[in-house]
Image (spheres, rainbow, N blue to C red):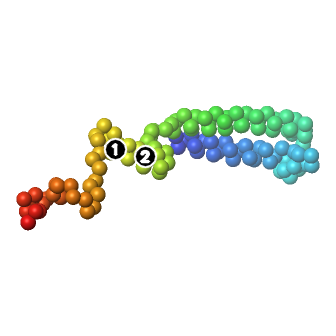
Amino acid sequence: MYVAVVILTVLVAAVLVVVILLQSSKGSGLSATFGGAGGEAMLSSRQAATVLHKLTIYLVAVFMFLCLLATLISGRRDTGPVTVTSAALEENSSTFNPGIPVQPLPTPGAASGTAPAGVDSSAAGN
């Protein structure tokens, strides 16, 4: 569904570009290039300007609707962190538990009376 809306949005945008370029500016614009002398027999310049102007308004409305629809369809499925910093903070917050007291490390060279881990305390004094 999302892909179809995006493809339709691109097509509407392409048609919108063509319609805008066909409108006559202060000069004759591209409408005179494609219309030539025979094109004015079907639509006068005033009628063509009105039709192209209305078509532009409708195409812009459709384009905006399709963009909003694509945004709503895509949604935000992943509610995880947005940035690398947020991800790191979230990862660290899950491993850090402030309810558990942290014991300070013994200072090197201080006689604490306890043996380091993995050393028998009776063999440490020999």
For marks 1 and 2, the one nearer the N-term is 2
The location of residue 64, given as percent across then percent down, is 66, 36
Give percent across and percent down for residue 20: 79, 44
Camera-side residue: 126 or 92? 126
Residue type at mark 2: give it.
Answer: Leu
> Residue tagged by mark 2?
89
**Is residue 75 positioned above or below 92 on the image?**
above
Q: What is the quadrant of the C terminus in the image?
A: bottom left
Tell me the crowding category of disc 1: few under 14, some 14 to 19, or many 20 or more residues within 10 angstroms, Cα based: few
Indicate the amino acid at tag 1: Phe
Name the residue: 86% across, 52% down.
33
Query: Residue drawn 74% across and 47% down?
Result: 17
- In percent of width and height, residue 97 lies at 32, 41
Q: CA distance from mark 1 to mark 2?
A: 10 Å
Residue 38 image point, x, y percent: 88, 46
User: What residue is disc 1 on?
Assistant: 96
In this orientation, which residue lies closer to the viewer: 101 or 59? 101
* Residue 52 position (above or below residue 33): above
Q: Residue at x 54, y 41 (%)?
A: 4
> Which residue is at the front of the view, 13 or 112?
112
Instruction: Please tell me how crowded label 2 is: few (under 14), some (14-19), or many (20+) other residues with Cα within 10 Å.
Output: few
Regarding residue 37, the answer to whether it shows in the image is: no
Does residue 62 show up? yes
Apparent side of residue 92 relative to residue 60 in the rendered image (left or right): left
What kind of element bears circle 2? Answer: helix
| Residue that appears at 17% across and 55% down | 113
Give the quarter of the image for residue 59: top right
Nearer the observer, disc 1 or disc 2?
1
